[in-house]
Image: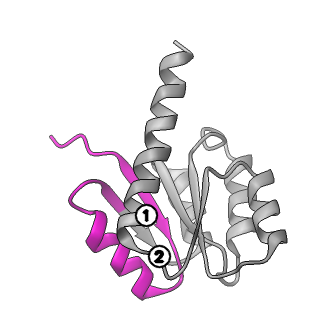
Amino acid sequence: MDNKLTILAVDDNSISLATIEQEFKGSYEVVALNSGTRALQYLKQKTPPDLILLDVQMAPLDGIETLRKIREMENCQNIPVIMLTSQREKQTIVESSKLGINDYVLKPFKTQDLHERIERVLKEECDKRMENR
């Protein structure tokens, strides 16, 4: 059995989702969902992913509100999150940071940059777990 780490990608833009799926499916188990509501349903039923890529601008539930609800869920408070957005407003960054994001990537993103950020965040999480043993 393959022991790939799981990335939950949540974005209402089908092109972004397809890009993430195509680019990362070789290295990770990628679960692609097109809404915050679906992401919350998935998290209630499945083992939490190792990382969440979360778009900010979605409807009806935006990324900030989705993340707020994720952080309230049992077993989901510490999942690393990288926000994906085309928004450059400081308030969005501040709100995301208050909810404990690990990184913030502006769209359109370069896949190599996103690869590096994912690897860095996952390594930091692994290092944290090793320190807490």
Q: Where is residue 20 drawn, in percent x and y?
A: 37, 72
Three-letter residue code for mark 1: Leu
Mark 1 crowd level (few <14, some 14–19, many ≥20, 10 Å Cα): many
Point out the stretch of residues depicted in magenta.
1-30
Q: Is residue 88 above or below residue 96?
A: below
First in sequence: mark 1 vs mark 2: 2
- The answer to which of 60 and 125 lies nearer the viewer is 125
- Give SS at disc 2: loop
Residue located 67% across and 54% down the image:
70
Q: Check if residue 60 falls in the magenta segment.
A: no
- Give SS at disc 1: helix
Three-letter residue code for mark 2: Phe
Residue located 57% across and 44% down the image:
79
Extreme residue in the left direction = 1
| Location of mark 1 (residue) | 114
Q: How far, Cα to Cα, is label 1 from label 2?
A: 7 Å
**Does the image show residue 61?**
yes
Q: Are marks 1 and 2 in contact (CB under 8 Å)?
A: yes
Q: Where is residue 38 drawn, in percent x and y?
A: 55, 70
- In which quadrant of the rendered view does residue 107 lie? bottom right
**Side of 46 relative to 67 (left or right):** left
- In which quadrant of the rendered view does residue 64 lie? bottom right
**Side of 15 relative to 77 (left or right):** left
Residue located 35% across and 66% down the image:
112
| Location of mark 2 (residue) | 109
- In which quadrant of the rendered view does residue 28 lie? bottom left
**Side of 35 relative to 91 (left or right):** left
Mark 2 crowd level (few <14, some 14–19, many ≥20, 10 Å Cα): few
Q: Where is residue 31 drawn, in percent x and y?
A: 38, 63
Extreme residue in the right direction = 91
- The answer to which of 116 and 102 lies nearer the viewer is 116
